[in-house]
Image: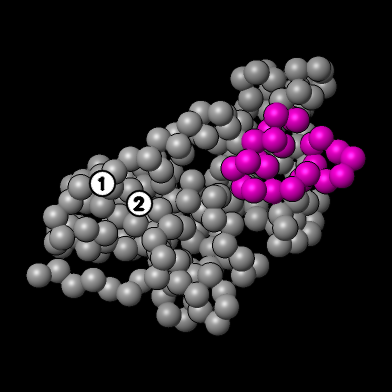
C-alpha cells in the first residue's frame, strides 16, 4: 500500500509528465517559520522518477530564481508565495525534457504585433516598466498589453499614473520569474484559457500512483 507523506498544500499538478513515462508530478507548499516553501514531488516508483524530480527542482531554482532552504525546499527570496505566477511557471517547466539546458530567460523578447523587441525593465524595489523598441503606436499598445498581461499572470499592481509600469507587492525584483513568464504575458488570453482548462480537469489514478 502506498504511503502518503505530509507535504503540505498541493499548489499545482502535472497529471501526465510525457518526459517521464506519464507519471504525475505535483508542486507542494509548506510553511516554514512563516515563510512559504515549495517542493516538487511524485509518488511514482518508476526508475526515472527521482531523476525527474531532481531536474524539476533545479529548474525551479535556476529558471525562477528560487533559493534553497536548509531542508531541501525552495522559496522566493522575498518570503512570499506569488502563487499564480509560480503555478503557471511550474507547468511550463514540466514541458522541459530532463537534462535540458537551464538558464534564466531574458527580459526582452520579439513581439510579432509590435514587429520588434519588447522589454520588461526593472526599476528596482519590484517595479518594472514595459518598453517597446518600436517607437510607434503599435509598439506602445503592445507595451501596455504586456503590462496588463503581467498584472494578470503575476498578480502585480499598476503604478499609479502609468499604463506601462507595475510592481510586485512584496517590493522585491523577480527578474527570472518575469523572464520565464514573458511569453505568457504577451499571450495572456491564451494563458488564461489554458489555466481554466487545467483547473477544471479531473485526475483519475490508482492509490499507488497518486501524487
Residue 121: x and y in percent read 75, 44
| Relative horizontal placement of residue 166, taking residue 97 as reference (left or right) | right
Q: What label does residue 203 carry, if any?
A: 1
Quarter assignment of residue 144: top right
Quadrant for the N terminus, please. bottom left
Q: Count residues near mark 2 (Cα–Cα under 10 Å), then give few for <14, some for 14-19, many for 20+.
A: many
Q: Are marks 2 and 1 in contact (CB under 8 Å)?
A: yes
Quadrant position of the C terminus in the picture: bottom left
Q: Nearer the viewer, mark 2 or mark 1?
A: 1
Please determine whether, in this image, residue 97 is positioned above or below residue 206.
above
Where is 98 relative to 195, above or below? below
Residue 168 in view here:
yes
Q: Is residue 81 left or right of residue 55?
A: right
In this view, 131 is above or below 127: above
Tell whether 138 sits left or right of 186: right
Q: Which residue is mark 2?
A: 13
What stretch of residues is rendered in magenta?
143-166
Task: Identify the residue shown where x is 49% and y is 46%.
Answer: 88
Q: Residue furthest right?
A: 161
Q: In the image, is residue 2 above or below residue 196?
A: below
* 12 in the magenta segment: no
Q: Position of residue 162 (x, y in %)?
A: 86, 38
Say what secondary structure mark 2 lies in: strand
Amino acid at each position: 500500500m502506498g504511503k502518503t507523506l505530509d507535504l503540505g498544500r498541493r499548489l499545482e499538478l502535472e497529471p501526465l509528465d510525457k518526459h517521464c513515462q506519464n507519471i504525475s508530478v505535483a508542486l507542494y507548499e509548506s510553511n516554514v517559520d512563516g515563510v512559504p516553501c515549495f517542493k516538487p514531488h511524485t509518488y511514482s516508483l518508476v526508475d526515472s522518477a527521482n531523476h525527474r524530480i531532481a531536474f524539476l527542482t533545479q529548474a525551479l531554482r535556476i529558471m525562477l530564481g528560487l533559493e534553497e532552504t536548509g531542508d531541501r525546499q525552495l522559496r522566493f527570496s522575498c518570503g512570499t508565495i506569488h502563487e499564480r505566477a509560480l503555478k503557471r511557471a511550474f507547468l511550463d517547466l514540466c514541458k522541459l525534457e530532463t537534462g535540458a539546458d537551464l538558464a534564466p530567460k531574458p527580459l526582452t523578447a520579439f513581439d510579432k504585433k509590435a514587429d520588434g523587441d519588447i522589454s520588461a525593465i526593472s526599476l528596482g524595489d519590484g517595479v518594472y516598466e514595459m518598453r517597446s523598441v518600436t517607437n510607434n503606436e503599435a509598439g506602445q499598445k503592445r507595451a501596455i498589453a504586456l503590462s496588463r498581461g503581467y498584472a494578470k499572470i503575476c498578480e502585480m499592481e499598476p503604478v499609479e499614473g502609468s499604463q506601462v509600469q507595475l510592481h510586485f507587492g512584496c517590493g522585491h525584483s523577480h527578474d527570472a520569474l518575469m523572464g520565464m513568464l514573458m511569453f505568457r504575458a504577451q499571450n495572456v488570453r491564451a494563458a488564461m484559457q489554458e489555466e481554466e482548462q487545467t483547473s477544471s480537469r479531473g485526475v483519475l489514478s490508482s492509490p499507488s500512483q497518486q501524487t
